[in-house]
Amino acid sequence: MNVNSGNIIITFFVIFIIVIIGFVLLITTNNDFKHQMVTENYYQKELNFQNVFLKYQRSKNFDVKINFNKNKLIVEFPENLRLNSVKGSVTVYRPSNNSLDFKKEIILKKNNFIIDFNKKSKGKWIVFLDWSYDNIDYMHKKEIYY
């Protein structure tokens, strides 16, 4: 075979194409690189934005704390609330993998609510606290990194 500059350019071009195709196949078949839509029913949630905005505004009147400490998510409500009047849920959302999302109903025996994170995967989580007190709706949001 005659080695000249044309053969070298074509050889490098073919190797480059093979590497790019291999990289594309690796990315599309590897489960570590799978990502979903940010949320399901995006348009329906956007239509409800004004209601959510009002919930966030009303929630500024209450000092609800959402903390993450030692593999536990702790939601603390103010001491002066009647616990039997607090209803709602905590939605924990994983932006990179919606199959890890989960939702828990708020059941208060004291003024706090604890969710165990021992078996959850590490990374960014977004916590939505959607609750009502005396039939008035409130919402809090916090990003945590576990």
Image: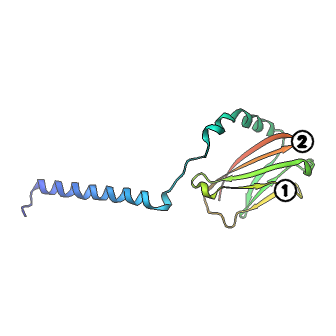
Closest to the observer, 127 or 143: 127
* Residue where numbered disc 2 is placed: 134
Q: Secondary structure at mark 1?
A: loop
| Amino acid on which the number 2 mark rests in the picture | Asp
- Residue 31 lies left or right of residue 122; in this view the side is left
| Amino acid on which the number 1 mark rests in the picture | Ile
Residue at the farthest top position? 50
Q: Residue 19: percent from the left, percent from the top?
A: 31, 59
Q: Residue 55: percent from the left, percent from the top?
A: 77, 38
Number of marks in picture = 2
Earlier along the polypeptide chain: callout 1 or callout 2? 1
Q: Quadrant of the C terminus?
A: bottom right
Kindly indicate the quadrant of the structure image that contains residue 7.
bottom left
Q: Residue at x 60, y 51 (%)?
A: 95
Closest to the observer, 4 or 13: 13
Q: Residues within 10 Å of mark 2 (few under 14, many from 20)?
A: few
Residue at the farthest left position? 2
Kindly indicate the quadrant of the structure image that contains residue 117.
bottom right
* Residue where numbered disc 1 is placed: 107
Q: Residue 11: percent from the left, percent from the top?
A: 18, 58
Colour scheme of the rendered structure:
rainbow
Q: Residue at x 85, y 50 (%)?
A: 77
Q: Secondary structure at mark 2?
A: loop
